[in-house]
Every structure is written in C-alpha cells, then in structure tokens.
Image (spheres, rainbow, N blue to C red):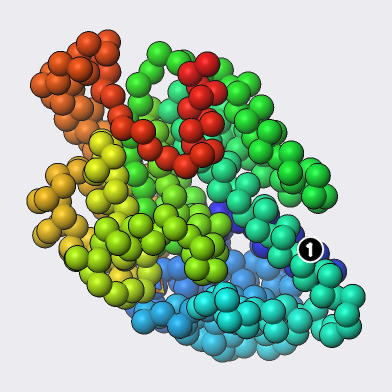
C-alpha cells in the first residue's frame, strides 16, 4: 500500500527477520494477479497477489497478509491467495494471516512470535521496540502525507513536492534510532519549508476518501493525489495506515466522530470504509470544502453502498460536489481519467467563484474564500509554515 512498506519493514527487521520489499505495484504485478485470480474477486486481491509474486521472485518464502473478520471478502484473502500461489507452482511459500480485527485482543503478538520463531524473554524487548518503531514510522508517514497534500498545491515547479516526498521515504527508512524518529517531524517541516512556493495562491480544498488499498496505493488509483495537487488543489485525506491501526486499538477519536456523523444513515459497520466515507463526506461539507473524491475498487460492496447513500441522500442535504472513481485492472486509461478530473476541478472552481460573488466577507478578503478552522495539529503547523 504505497509508502507504507517503510513502517512494515521496520516492524519485521526489528524482530531480526530478513525483509524482502516487493517492487512497487506495477503493470506486470497487476497482470499476474489478474491472470491467476477469480475474475469477480475484488481488485485489491488481484493487486496484492501480484505483489506477493514479486516478493517471491525476489526471494521471499513467507508472506504476511492482514485479515479482518469484516462482513466483506477481506477475511478470505490470505487463505485463497495461499492456495492460488501453491497452484501457480510456489509450493513452499506460506501466507501468514495477521489478525487485525481487534488489535486489543493481541492475537497479532502470537503471529509475530511465530514469525520470529523465538519464545525467549529477550524477544519480548524486541517486540516492544518493533511495535514502537512501527507506530512511530506509521505516524510520520501520516504526517508526510498531510504535508504533501497541502504543499503541492502551492509549488511553483511541478514535481518538487513529489521529489521531496520520495526522498523523505528513503530518509525515514534509514532512520532507525528513537532520537532520529523523535526529530523526524522537524525534518519533514524543514524539507517542505525549502520548497519554492507561491504564497499568494488560494487553493481549492478537496477531501479524499474510499477503500483503504485503493486510497493508499498510487499505482492503482492512477496517482490521483499528485494529479489533483498539480492542478492546484489542496488534498485532505485522513485515511492512512496510522489512522487505521489507531482505530483498531480503539483510540481513534476522529473516526468515532465520523461514525457519529454517519450513524443516522448507516448504523453499523458493513465492511470497507463505508461508515467513515459517509462521515468524511458530511464532515468535509460542514467544514466548507469545495469538493470530495470517493475512490473504490469495482465490485466493492461496502463502497458501492456508500456511493448510493451519498448520491441518494447526503448530496441532497449537504450539496458538496463529489466525483466517484471505481478502479480495476481496466482503469488505466490516463486520458479519460485526466479529463474527468479536469472537468471536476473546473466545476468546483466555478462554484467557488459563485460563492465569493454572493458573500461580502469573501469579497472583502481580496476575493478569496474564508475556510473555517479545520485539520489536525500537524496540518495546522504546515499551514503556519506556508503563511509565515
Ligand atoms: S472492502 Fe471492498 S475491496 Fe476490500 S475486501 Fe471488502 S469488498 Fe473487497
């Protein structure tokens, strides 16, 4: 899932395991995944099967796949993928399920123990280190994503933010002491602060949410964050690996707020990100955003349900412009994709102009829309950097 290999790598190297990072998801991996998967299975199943083959070809013999007890198909991924890999001739590989249904049940500790192959007392101190480093890196990846979403909308030279983002992943991968990780937030701010930006801009604000694999893996979502950012749009995406893990530890109060918002329309978790997508849509509408993007895999039941509720109900109440993207192995037509995004950005630009024309406060503010205060602490630190 995109840059999150950095956090997972640290989790397993801290347990003295050799880690094979598969190549970034690519056309070849998707082709293999599609060829060997059941036709109507979800797209993330196919993409991750292709990633597994990539890792096996680089020498991996043990694969770890998260599982959930959710009402959708995610709970079956690991078992079916292992059988498929055996059928493909990779008889000696095993796919270990990493149970993340409720992290406070600590089933994952047993999985890590089994993977490390050790039960001695010394290994427990390594567990603690592995989990702390994993969480810290996941949080820093979340902060990098926040900064990238904001700064790209202000960059003067297209591609600068992407370059800083990629360099930063390598730096984070190499940061392997607690003091380096404690100071890393400073590194993020310093690096982004060196970007050549145009402070006079007033970017459109767009919220982005959807199914987790599609939202976090840029190859499968056709790098939608970068494309929107390069059109001068500020991206707000609270969904990240860290956001998910903290939720599974029952400590994610932002998600609880989103559940509260979506409860009148969907009172239970039906899998995927459905409940939280509805909450995000309402939350962003209330925060005066200009638009919303919902991305999900073709045939994903929970996300299609979210789309239907937004279209038939929420859109009529909150009137926040929304665009939907359903991705699968056929969704690689760059031209059509770009045209749809451009049309959406044109539409929300026009809508904002109308808003400004009707609002005396916005006109007095140099014809710029005033947005309510929004975002987490790190987002606010980033906007301070932008405006000082
Ligand atoms: S959330 Fe959607 S894509 Fe993911 S396993 Fe469930 S149905 Fe499939």
Residue occupying the point 18% across, 21% down: 356
Residue 27 in view: no
In this rendering, is residue 160 above or below 62? above
Q: Name the residue under label 1.
A: 129
**Quadrant location, the N terminus:** bottom right
Residue at 27% x, 10% y: name it. Answer: 366
Q: Residue 232 location in percent, x, y?
A: 38, 27
Q: Residue at x 43, y 28 (%)?
A: 153
Q: In this view, does 98 lie to the left or right of 158?
A: right
Quick one: 328 or 153, which is closer to the camera?
A: 153
Q: Quadrant of residue 233?
A: top left
Q: Camera-side residue: 149 or 296?
A: 149
Please rate how many residues cluster around mark 1, counting C-alpha atoms within 10 Å: few if below 14, some from 14 to 19, many from 20. Answer: some
Nearer the observer, 60 or 386: 386
Which percent across, then down, holds residue 348?
22, 33
Residue at the spot 10% in from the left edge and 51% down from the top edge: 316
Residue 20 at what x, y percent from top left? 74, 65
Image coordinates for residue 222, horizontal then vertical, percent: 43, 48
The residue tagged with tag 1: helix, strand or loop?
helix
With 300 as the anchor, is 197 left or right in this view?
right
């Amino acid at each position: 899932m995109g840059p999150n290999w950095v956090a997972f790598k640290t989790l397993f190297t801290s347990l003295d395991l050799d880690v094979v990072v598969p190549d970034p998801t690519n056309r070849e991996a998707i082709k293999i995944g599609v060829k060997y998967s059941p036709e109507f299975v979800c797209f993330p199943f196919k993409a991750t099967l292709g990633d597994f083959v990539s890792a096996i070809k680089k020498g991996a013999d043990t694969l770890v796949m998260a599982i959930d007890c959710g009402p959708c198909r995610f709970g079956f991924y690991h078992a079916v993928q292992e059988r498929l890999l055996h059928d493909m001739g990779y008889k000696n590989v095993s796919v270990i399920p990493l149970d993340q249904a409720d992290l406070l049940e600590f089933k994952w500790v047993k999985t890590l123990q089994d993977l490390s192959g050790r039960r001695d007392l010394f290994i427990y101190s390594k567990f603690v280190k592995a989990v702390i480093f994993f969480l810290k890196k996941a949080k820093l990846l979340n902060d990098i994503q926040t900064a990238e979403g904001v700064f790209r909308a202000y960059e003067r030279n297209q591609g600068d933010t992407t370059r800083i983002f990629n360099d930063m992943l390598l730096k984070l991968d190499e940061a392997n002491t607690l003091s380096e990780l404690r100071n890393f937030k400073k590194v993020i701010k310093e690096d982004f602060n060196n970007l050549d930006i145009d402070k006079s801009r007033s970017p459109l604000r767009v919220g982005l949410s959807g199914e987790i694999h599609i939202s976090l893996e840029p190859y499968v979502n056709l790098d939608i964050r970068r494309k929107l950012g390069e059109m001068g749009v500020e991206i707000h995406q609270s969904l990240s690996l860290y956001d998910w893990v903290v939720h599974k530890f029952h400590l994610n109060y932002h998600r609880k707020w989103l559940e509260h918002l979506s409860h009148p329309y969907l009172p239970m978790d039906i899998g995927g990100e459905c409940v939280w997508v509805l909450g995000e849509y309402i939350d962003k509408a209330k925060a005066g955003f200009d638009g919303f993007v919902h991305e999900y895999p073709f045939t994903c039941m929970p996300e299609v349900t979210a789309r239907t509720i937004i279209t038939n109900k929420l859109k009529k109440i909150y009137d926040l412009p929304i665009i939907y993207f359903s991705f699968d192995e056929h969704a690689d037509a760059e031209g059509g994709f770009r045209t749809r995004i451009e049309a959406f950005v044109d539409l929300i630009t026009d809508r904002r102009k109308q808003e400004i024309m009707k609002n005396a406060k916005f006109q007095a503010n140099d014809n710029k829309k005033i947005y309510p205060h929004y975002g987490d602490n790190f987002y606010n630190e980033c906007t301070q950097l932008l405006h000082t």
